[in-house]
Amino acid sequence: MNVWEILFGLIAAFTCTVGFGICFGIRKGELYLSGIAGVLTRAVIVSCEALGMERFVYTLIAAAIGTLYAEIVARHRTEPIAKYVYPAVVLLIPGDILYKMVLAMIQLDHAAASANLTLLLMSLFGIALGCMLTPILFRPFRKK
Amino acid sequence: MPATVLEKQKPLSRLEVAQLTEFAVDYGASLLMSGGEIWRADMMIRRIFDIYGFKNVELFILPHTVMVSVLPAGESEMVSVHKEVGEIHVNLEQLTVLNRLVWSLQKQTLPTAELGKKLRDITVGHVYPRYMIIAGMALALVSLSYYFRAGVMGAILVTIGIAVAMGFQMYLGEKLHVNRFLLCGAAAFLAGCVLMLGSAIGLHPDPYLLMVINCIGLIPGIPLINACREILFGKVLSGGLLFMTAFIETLAVACGFALSSLCLGFLL
């Protein structure tokens, strides 16, 4: 992957997250913050893929870093963390695996369907676990 | 009307407890309908009761139901309110406003009679008009087309496909009053037909790749992740139900696409 491909990939991540941000009802003035979350997540994915990591591992790391960003921005702006977590993790949702799994089910290819189901569950739990790590680490510093 | 600071120690009457419980249930339902997590609704409802001096509150929250029971001071009969939650549409602005309401209550409590009106007043509704939401999703999917190497024509077809699917869901879906899963399946089927026809006239060689991209826009990704988070938080029942609901919706979307390829596959 060359520099231009990475750069265009990050721009695509920004516009993609902004697009999802509009669907999620984030106000105009705050859309760039969700775009940055997408860029950050994409940068982590690209770096982890370059290091040859498994999907479960890099979704977990990307979700954890996206949530860390969300936690920092939410604290700074005194807003709920969910507002920035959703745009950060939306790029990690394994829609492609979901589709392949159902297609395999319809084609009665049980081996491919179960392999994709395993991959899907691992990706989803990887994202969920990544989202939980940062709040757990931040808990001792939270105001009561 | 200026907010009144209540004395926290003064026990609430049965009527006030009923008003507070009703507000808490409505609040929880609004939170869930805006895409909030179940654990968040649980935490916020407990916080509301905590502000008004109630420590022991019984909560039962499922993806589509909120139930709250509380025992007023000096009484033997509980006040119990439950509410069915409507369809979930992620609205992060509404979620923010709802969070701020509880934070403001922590600073300054309001009389229970005013709480319901306050909740109605802060309802945001849709931040953007429907066409903007469709345009936003189209922007997201066109960007995703870059990762899938779908090309310019692929991106255009994906845009048309998602516009047809979401337009059908938003404009016709409300009038038809059909089952949510059927509606998702039908929307995906229509999008799939657009992609198959586009490929049949030679606009793109691989309609299945475009279906994968469109599928990402139609599946309930956030509820799926929230369900996994609920399960990891130990709320297996509510998380499992949420997962099943989101998974069936996903199956409906994928089946819609698969059905369109089966019906129009002969054109390729």
Image: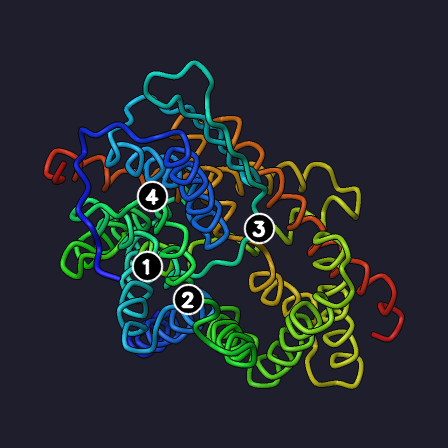
- Element at label 1: helix
- Element at label 2: loop
Q: Amino acid at mark 4?
A: Thr
First-in-chain label (4 vs 1): 1
- Foreground mark, 4 or 1? 4
Residue closest to the eye, B202 or A63: A63
Tell whether label 1 touches label 2 (CB within 8 Å): yes
Q: Which residue is mark 3?
A: A97
Task: Categorize mark 2 by other alpha carbons within 10 Å: few (<14), some (14-19), many (20+).
Answer: some
Q: Which residue is mark 4?
A: B112
- Foreground mark, 2 or 3? 2
Q: Amino acid at mark 2?
A: Val
Tell whether label 1 touches label 3 (CB within 8 Å): no
Q: Amino acid at mark 3?
A: Ile
Q: Which residue is mark 1?
A: B97
- Tell me the quarter of the picture where residue A15 sits: bottom left
Q: Amino acid at mark 1?
A: Val
First-in-chain label (4 vs 2): 4
- Element at label 4: helix
CA gap, disc 2 to disc 1? 8 Å
Q: Position of residue B26 (x, y in %)?
A: 46, 46
First-in-chain label (2 vs 1): 1
Whether residue A123 is visible here, answered yes or no, is: no
Chain under callout 1 = B
Residue closest to the eye, B182 or B175: B175
Q: Quadrant of the N terminus of chain B?
A: bottom left
Residue depicted at 62% across the width and 61% down the height: B215
Same chain for the residues at labels 3 and 1, yes or no? no
